[in-house]
Amino acid sequence: MTDISFPAPSFRLIRDRLDGPAPQGLEGAVVALGNFDGVHRGHRAVIQAAQARARALGKPAAAMTFEPHPRVLFDPETPDFRLSSVDEKVRLLAATGLDGAIVMGFDRALAALTPAEFVQKVLLDRHKVAGVATGFDFQFGKGRAGTTEFLRKEGERLGFTVDIAPPLLDAGERVSSGAVRSALTRGEVEHAWRLLGYPWFQSGEVVHGDSRGRDLGYPTANLKLDPNCKLRHGVYAVRVGVDGKRYDGVANFGRRPMFDTGVTLLEAFLFDFKGDLYGKTIDVAFYAFLRPELKFRAVEDLIDRMNEDSKAAHQILAGAGNAFPQLTDVAVTKRG
């Protein structure tokens, strides 16, 4: 167990919608534009570009992101595997040192804006940006017709700075949210960690299970993840954040073949923890895939394997140092 130190909150969160009045609090900022699902290393390069420009101009730096993800609006039948919920994303953004974030409600009205209308109505009229930074492949406006080149020209014409971050490569692979999702679906959480820059995590409220783990000598904290989570089912070495503390542990994600009730759960056993977690919101970070889910001939065989899993997780996490997602729990100013 180790302590988690959070920086003092000075982060401002603004939720904005086109059908409401223009919000106050971050006007005149240099904004990093993007969806920022996962806030991976490529996203952080965009954020760092915004922060550098903001320092040069003597302005605040903020992120502007969009919720829900445009895919939800345009392709609602396709499952949307999110790397981070909006709350998780905000906590990650706050930890980068940004002054705030603007969460734009993505709806039909916003989607219908032409690129020029988006620049004028959203960036300038509503938020009076001093500059923007974004990734090389950012597209925006109706039909995704807005390009970074268009954005650059609009900045020159209308008087705001534009910084475009180039693609970020890792061993020849482009760092992207899609690459992280692909790694997680294969259970390659170490690969995802490298692309993200931190161990991938999920937050959730601890719910009651069937107490099966307690009967086996492994009481677990149970979380119901988003049904669209495509993390490979199996057993993982994890580290869990609870009430400002971290605990090493082992977790199973899936349907437990020995006791399958048809419900997919994340069940985390925390080493060296005693207490009641029901109703608490915890963070579970993933460090290594240990094995797939298995069905054993007898409960005793399952317990023996759980003992082996715990030993393996202890060894892996002992070599992980203090690695944990950098998260800031902030006092936020919400609108809408």
Image (tube, rainbow, N blue to C red):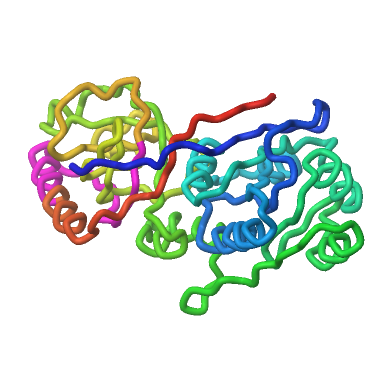
Instruction: Please give the name of the residue rendered at 30% of the width and 35% of the height, measured from the top-left corner.
Output: 244
Question: Is residue 234 something one can see in this rendering?
Answer: yes
Camera-nearest residue between 13 and 290:
13
Quadrant housing residue 3: top left
Instruction: Please give the name of the residue rendered at 58% of the width and 44% of the height, measured from the top-left corner.
Output: 99
Instruction: Please give the name of the residue rendered at 40% of the width and 49% of the height, measured from the top-left corner.
Output: 326
Camera-nearest residue between 44 and 185:
44
Quadrant housing residue 32: bottom right
What range of the chain is rendered magenta? 283-308
Does the magenta run of residues contain 299?
A: yes
Q: Position of residue 331 (x, y in %)?
A: 50, 30
Q: In which quadrant of the rendered image does the C terminus lie? A: top right
Q: Note whether 31 is above or below 18 in the view shown.
A: below
Q: Position of residue 264 (x, y in %)?
A: 39, 35
Whether residue 228 sits left or right of residue 282 in the image: it is right
Instruction: Please give the name of the residue rendered at 18% of the width and 42% of the height, measured from the top-left corner.
Output: 1
Camera-nearest residue between 99 and 185:
99
Question: Is residue 178 something one can see in this rendering?
Answer: no
Whether residue 100 sits left or right of residue 217 in the image: it is right
Q: Position of residue 278 (x, y in %)?
A: 30, 21
Whether residue 37 sits left or right of residue 261 in the image: it is right
Whether residue 37 sits left or right of residue 185 in the image: it is right
Does the magenta run of residues contain 25?
A: no
Q: Position of residue 237 (x, y in %)?
A: 25, 51
Outermost bottom residue: 172
Outermost front residue: 58
